[in-house]
Structure formats: structure tokens, C-alpha cells
Amino acid sequence: MAEGKTIVLKIKRRAGPAEPARWEEFAVAWRPNLNVIACLIAIAENPVTRDGRNTTPVSYESNCLEEVCGACAMVINSRSRQACSALVDQLEQPIRLEPMSKFPIVRDLVVDRSRMFENAKRLRCWVPIDGTYAIGPGPRVAPERQEVAYALSRCMFCGNCLEVCPKVNENSDFVGAALLNQVRLFNAHPTGRMHAHERLQAVRGIGGVQDCDNAQNCVKACPKNIPLTESNNDVNRQALLDAILGWMLR
Amino acid sequence: MSETRIQLIGGGLAGLMAAIRVAELGHPVDLFSVVPVRRSHSVCAQGGINAAKNLKGEGDSTWQHFDDTVYGGDFLQNQPLVKGMCEAAPGIIDLLDRMGVTFNRTAEGLLDFRRFGGTLYHRTAFAGATTGQQLLYALDEQVRRYEAEGRIRKLEGWMFLSAVLDDAGVSRGVCAVSLRSGEIRAFPGDATIVATGGIGSIFGQSTNSVACTGSAQSALFQQGVHYANAEMIQVHPTAIPGEDKCRLISESVRGEGGRVWVPKTPHDARDPRTIPEAERFYFLEEWYPKYGNLVPRDVATRAIHKVVHEEGLGVDGKAMVYLDVTHLPREMLMRKLGGVLEIYEKFVGLDPCEHPMKVFPAQHYTMGGLWVDNETQATNVPGIYAAGECDYQYHGANRLGANSLLSCLYGGMLAGPAAVRYARNLTVSAEATPASVFAREQKRQEEIYDRLRNQEGNESPIRIWREMGETMTRHVTVTRYNKDLAAADAKLAELQERYRSINLADRARWGNQSLHFTRELGNMLVLARLVSQSAILRDESRGAHYKPEFPDRDDERWLRTIRARYEGGKFQFEFDPVDTSLIPPRKRSYKS
């Protein structure tokens, strides 16, 4: 495309959770290296629809804009992904923006993903340290183990893996791949492992691993390439062993 | 009587560390954050965190770290605090290690360290090239643990508006707005720790996150908290220019062997990979043989400006230079720098292992900030503390790479217990403070919001924000002339006038982002003027503050902290001596 062209966006809007959904179309001037966020800023600067109607700026979440904070997840052309790394030149037009569907809607493209953080609490996703005072270095870790753990620990809680999961729905309590991956991460840590049983018990208690049906959508949707199916299987195996042989393994 | 309650504003590294320390001391914490804390700007820190662990047999020491930091900051720091930070650093790394941060390891299973700018030692611990993210996650998890125990209450999606000050000028809590419902509420708190980060948004496009507006600092400044060295703004040499933000390409890329160069021929149109070595100008290595590509950021940024603007050697004739890692093994690059090279590939569309990256300087860090004392992170207003990027300590006129994560954590570690000590000694608690004190402040904030929602005019907040950013980036960053600074300040005054004619397209309460942004914009304009006016005052060149008309450092006149007060709508400035009791100031040069 050349300068002078415009980009067309179709955005699904909702003024609030109880309000009806509607679609609005916008035209934004094309510039090189534009991403979806830059388009939303342009719309906020001049909130007028393509057919010339005055409207309100579109609400959306964002923060880091370099795909490390997880805030700006939304459904773009039917694909759940981060809006900051969605480059306009790589998208088919009109670009359709919708809020994620698996989380309660707040307004326009903003949804409430606090369920993920609540589940992290229930699954005890942390290394229980004794305190912040000086008690010397942590455990030694082999470089290979660090590399595995690092790959798992890059999860931004963006929620894309939950959005694409057929098992995450209104009729299920399944916590989703991101959370199972957290359980794997902390159960693999030399200190975290000492409390693996508590996490596995919690996994079995709430919508845990037995609900995953290996659709493998999660791993494809993850913007950080976390081996999520591997994590699902690993935690599944751990939970099973813990249920059968729990007291012996502890 | 109720329990002593401490409030935290901001859930980045400094805020979370302070919250953990307060919870550990057994006091309830209210943690306010505009974003879920796991999404705070600390995630953007890439390269690592400094600590003189001396695990590479180089004879590194905490004193050497201290000296590098003070020298890097061009002697504008109060030194005892910096010394304390450098001495605490190895212990802080141990703590993070115990929390489970996935630091890179050596074959022996120990922490690996790499080089960074402004030092000759391997002193930087790192977790790939997403160290800030990994550190923030570790702290986020510890906070969640306390949250599960009911000791920390998170108020995510609440934006700080102001401190609640009683008739004696003592802080009794804060006023905040729910970004979701629009509700404005006053919260009692016995002490408040502000940890709201940098002010990148006043420069429009910077490397900072969207939340880094400086609105909280500005609001506090306008309520009487002093602000120091506002003119000290760091411009990072290597970022990818962008429409919505400038994306940082970490200094660690050079720490691992990346080289900065331009073609010797202006407007050389060849594919950079086909340009022979002899026809490349590795200007940092040539001009600074000892430190090479790892000179401090202010030095590297000025060198890039010189090569591009004065010598006309920018890549493709544009304001850009090459940052090249194509000579390094891909496997090592992916293991140690994967996170940052991924950003380049995703946002530019080229594999940096194959193509030299095109980068240019961008506003990155706020060295100045809320004034705090030299021991406890306390501001001049009783009950208000500050820690992290929003305070002015530790970095002087220029921050060294990988010292920011450290200063955030150290500041948080000091502020938490200090706030608790203060609050325990209060004779009247926040709970016992008359309700009228809270109602008064809440009403004041509601009136400001009502005015914004109802005012008429033809201005758009985004347009004013863009003009502010362009003005600040053009005149108040790398090279500063007094005439331009004055013009910038006049332009900002004009924008403040136009701000009153903002006509909001959205007047709802629920989820009205442009309303909240506009509220912040008013504060941003005040802060932008403060930065410009402080820059006008400092007639010398020191660290990141460079005035061609005053090219030398002038210790006689300007080895001073510029401390600003807000009185009756005007800025008043005072010039305080700097505590240089440990390392006498010496000439700063990275040439040899």
C-alpha cells in the first residue's frame, strides 16, 4: 500500500456489560509500520465513524506495547492475539476487532481477566520463601533446567490460551493451560517442589487437568511459544501419581 | 483502635517490594495500581540487574560498583544512599534467586553475569533478555501469596488522584478513581508510598509503557511534595522508532558483543551485509576505545546524534544507525538475548541474526523525580514516601544500565519499613482523622472530573498530548538550547490554555478511558513545564543534560540538586548541595 490510503476497521462495541453489542466501522490513514494500537489511538483522536457519525473513543486495554505485559489481548480477524504486535500490513481488511469471549465484558474491547489471577492464588503459584531477609543464595540450578523453566516463566497471563480452548466455557471450571503451566513451573523449582502436593491437590479440586481434552489450540495461540500441551500433560501425570501414590512420594 | 494501614501507589518492582516488606512486618497493605500489577512497566526492563558478586574472577567489588554508578551519574547523586544500594545488591540478587527468578546459569549452576554500559566488569545478572519481566513476576507471586493470606489488598484498576492532607499538612490517605466505574473515593491510610515509575508519556513516543504518565508525581507536586532534578531525562541510544511507542533494544545486545556502525559513505544504498568492514564506521569503538560500544547511554546517544545530524551519516540518510549482531552465533544470541531480538523481528519483520538492526535514540528513563530524604525515601510531606523511578535519588545526571531494577528494589526495601516506623509513631491514626478531611478532598476531585466531563470547546486530548510530546522530544531531550527550552515552555503554556477547551466525545462514567486520560494530561502538562524550566536553569552540561552553549560541567555553580516547590500555581526553585562525601568529584571521560 502507498501513502494516502486508508485502513478500514470494524469494531464490535458495547457501552457496558448490560448494553447491546453493535459494530462500528472506522477509516484510519495508512502509515508505515502501523499496528492495531496505533489505529485505536488515531480513532480516539478523531472518534468519527466511516460514515461520518460522531461516536466515542474505543475502550481497550494496553500497557507495554511490546508484547511482554499481556494487556492488549483481543480477537483480531477471528484470531485471539495481542493488538500491539498485530501489524496492519499483515492483516486482511476490514480489520475486525472483538473483545475476548471467554471473559466477562467490561466495555468495548475490555474484558475482566481477574479469574486467571484468582486461580493462580488458589493453585498457590509461588515459591514459598521464608522471608526477604538475607539468608544466602538460592539453590544451584543446571543451565538446562533454567532454560526449561525460563520458557515456562514467560507467561504474561494474556488469556489467549483460554480464549481458544474448547474446554474453557460457561459449563466448565477448567482453569486453562496458562494456569497448569504455572503449576508445572513451580513444581519444578527446587523449593517450589517441596509444596507440589498442595498445588496438585488444588488442581484436582478445582477445574483441573482432567478437563483438558488435548485440542492443542492453546499452544498455537500462545504469543510466547510456551510448550503448553507439554505442561498440561506433565501436570496431568503429576496429579495422577500424586492421587495414587501421594503419601509415598512425599 | 484499628491496625496501622500502609498504602502503596503503583505495582511495579518498587511498589511490590515495599508491599512485601510491609506485609512481612505484619501490617495490612492497600496496593493501588492502574493495571493488574503483573502488567506494570517493570516488565519492559530487558538486560539485567547489577550486583558486584565478583563471580568472574575480575576483582569486582561493591565499592567499584558504587564508583561506576557515581561516575556514570556525573557526581550529581547523594553518595551514601548509592553506596548502600551497591552494598545491598548481592543480597538482593540472592533474594530474587530464592524467589525463583530464572536467572541464566553457568555450567556450575551459579548465576551468570554479563557486561553492561559504563563498567568494565561482568556485573549484570540476567534472565534471558526479559529480566524485568521475570523479576516482576517473582514479586507478583510473593504478593499474591500475601494476598491469599489476606495481608495485602489489591485495588487494581484504581488510579491515584491526590493525597488527602489534613489541616496540618499531614497525609492521611489518598483519593483515587475507579477506571471501570468512575467512582471517586477517599481511602484512609497512615502512610503512603508512591511508586509510580517514569514520566515517558510527556515525551509522546518513548520506551515507557502507556501507564507511565507521571500524573501521580505531578499531582503530589501540586499538593506540596518537592520535585528534584526534573531536567535529568535519559535518552536511550538504541530503540526502534514507532507510531505508538519506541521499542527498546537493550544495552545487553552490546554487552554480548553487538556493534554500532554506519556506512562511511553518506546515503549508502547497499544491503548492509555487503558493505565491507573497511567501509563501515564503528564510531563508538573509534571515539571511545576503552569502553567501545559500552559507553554510558548519554555518551552513546550524543555520539549517534553527532554521526547522524552533524556528519550526515545516518542509514539511508535517515535518523538511524545500525546495531549489528550478525557476526555472533545464533545459538548464543537466542539463549541470552532471545526476548529482545524477538521484539525486533515481530515489530520490524526482519531477523536480527541476519540483518543489522536499524535503531535510534528514544526517551527512556526519568532520573529526576519526587524529592526524598537521604535515608528513608521520605518526601517533605509527613506520611508520603516515594521509591523507584519516581524518586530522584541514586542515578544523578545519568543512570547506568541495569541499575534501575536494583534501585527500584532497594528503594522499596527502604520505604516499606520506614513508612511502618513512621505510622506506628503517629498519635492520631488515619481512621481517627475527621471524616470531613476525606470528604473535602473527595469533593475537590469530583469537581475536577465534573468540569472535564461538562466543558465545551473544540480540542481533543490526544491532539494536545501529541503536540506536547513533539515539543518535549524536539527541544527537551538530547541537545538543549535555552532559546528552544523557553519556546518549549511557552508552547506548553499554550497547551495548558487549550486544555480548558477540550471537548470530550465521551461523557459516560463507565469505563471512560479518554476522561481519565484527560485528567492525567492536565498533570502531565504541569510536569512537562517543570522539566523544561529546570532545564533552562541548569546552565552547564552534566550527564544526560547537554547544552552546547555551556559545554562543560560546572561544579562551582551546579554541583547542586535543583529542588522545585509549587506555590500558588508557580514553581519556586532551590539549589541544594550534593553529598559527595565519599568520592570526590573528578572529570568524567570515557575516552581512555
Image (spheres, coloured by chain):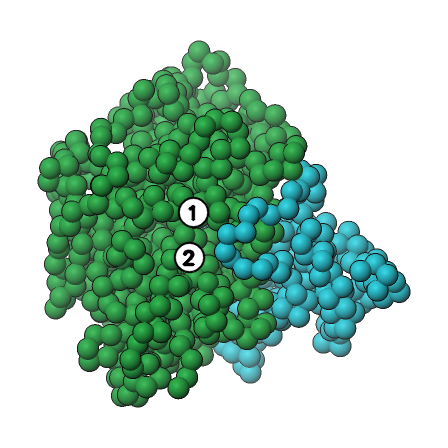
Chain colours: A cyan, B green
* Mark 2 crowdedness (10 Å alpha carbons): few <14, some 14-19, many ≥20: many
Mark number displayed over residue B344: none
Residue B566 x %, y %: 16, 63
Q: Is residue B194 above or below residue B263?
A: below
The amino acid type of the residue labelled 2 equals Met
Res. B90 in view: yes
Q: Check whether the beta carbons of the residues at disc 1 and disc 2 lie within 8 A of each other.
A: yes
Mark 2 chain: B
Residue B230 x %, y %: 24, 51
Q: Is residue B49 left or right of residue B524?
A: right
Mark number displayed over residue B413: 2
Q: Is residue B559 left or right of residue B197?
A: left
**Residue found at the far front of this picture:** A135
Q: Is residue A4 above or below residue A156?
A: above
Q: Is residue B394 left or right of residue A20?
A: left
The residue drawn where x is 47% and y is 35% is B123
Q: Nearest the camera: A214 or A249?
A: A249
The residue drawn where x is 47% and y is 26% is B58
Q: Nearest the camera: B495 or A24?
A: B495
- Position of the C terminus of chain A, as image quadrant, is bottom right
Q: Nearest the camera: A24 or A166?
A: A166
Q: Nearest the camera: A193 or B536?
A: A193
The amino acid type of the residue labelled 1 equals Ala
The residue drawn where x is 68% and y is 62% is A179
Mark 1 chain: B
Residue A103 x %, y %: 62, 71
Dot 1 or dot 2, earlier in sequence:
1
Secondary structure category for the residue under label 1: helix
Q: Which residue is mark 1?
A: B88
